[in-house]
Image (cartoon, helix red, strand yellow):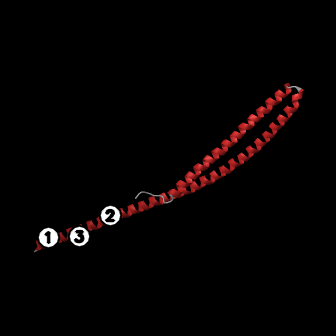
Amino acid sequence: MPFRYRLQKALDFRIRKKDQQLQAVILAQQEVYKIEGMIELNNREIDSTRINMKKADFYLLDAYDKFLKSLYEKGEQLEQAKQKAQEVVEEEKRKLTEAEKDVKVLEKHKERMLEIYKEEEKAAELKRLSEVAVQRFFARRKEEEDDAEREEKRKHKSEN
């Protein structure tokens, strides 16, 4: 009878859960990269605005100041969003680590059960072989006894 792990469905469920959690980590990390790209874009816009501000007429300086202030505020908001997204990534990674640990526990259990199964199968095979050997031994012994009886009968007949 082949080995059948009785908790295979639970193991499969935990593997699927781990894979889903891995996808959640990837999505969270992509969100961080997206925000980092937005921050980079905002920083480039700040730099170009500063350069344009130096070339601008004096009556536009107030508008440039307000625009730069809004860009700095946007940069701060993006940094906060990045921080939150990184916290989400860390939380998702923690969940992934937990899911991987759950899978490893069941995989180790499955390996131990497989080893126990192999040992039991080996013991059963040895028992069958032992039984066969005992049967052969008794069959040979019976045959030897029969031969000895026949030999005695022949000797007994020849004496008479």
Residue most toward the right? 58
In the rendered image of this protein, does residue 129 appear above or below residue 30?
below
| CA gap, disc 3 and disc 1 | 14 Å
Amino acid residing under circle 1: Arg
Secondary structure of the residue carrying numbered label 1 = helix
Residue 108, how many percent across, how many down?
Answer: 54, 56
Residue holding disc 1 = 154
Give the number of the mark in front: 3 or 2.
2
Q: Nearer the viewer, residue 64 or 83?
A: 64
Q: Is residue 35 visible?
A: yes
Q: Relative to the observer, which residue lies in front, 21 or 135? A: 21
Tell which circle, 3 or 1, labels the residue nearer the N-terminal end: 3
Above or below — where is 56 with respect to 68? Answer: above
Q: CA distance from mark 3 to mark 2?
A: 20 Å
Q: Earlier in the sequence, mark 3 or mark 2?
A: 2
| Horizontal relation, residue 32 to residue 18: left or right | right
- Residue 101 appears in which quarter of the rendering? bottom right
**Residues at badges 3 and 1 in contact (C-beta under 8 Å)?**
no
In the figure, residue 36 lies in which quadrant? top right
Q: Residues within 10 Å of mark 3 (few under 14, many from 20)?
A: few
Q: Is residue 136 left or right of residue 90?
A: left
Q: Earlier in the sequence, mark 1 or mark 2?
A: 2
Identify residue type, mark 3: Glu
Q: Which numbered dot is residue 145?
A: 3
Position in image of residue 68 (x %, y %): 83, 35
Identity, as a three-letter code, of the amino acid under mark 2: Val
> Toward the viewer: 27 or 99?
27
Dot 3: what SS? helix
Q: Which label belongs to residue 146?
A: none
Q: Which residue is mark 2?
A: 132
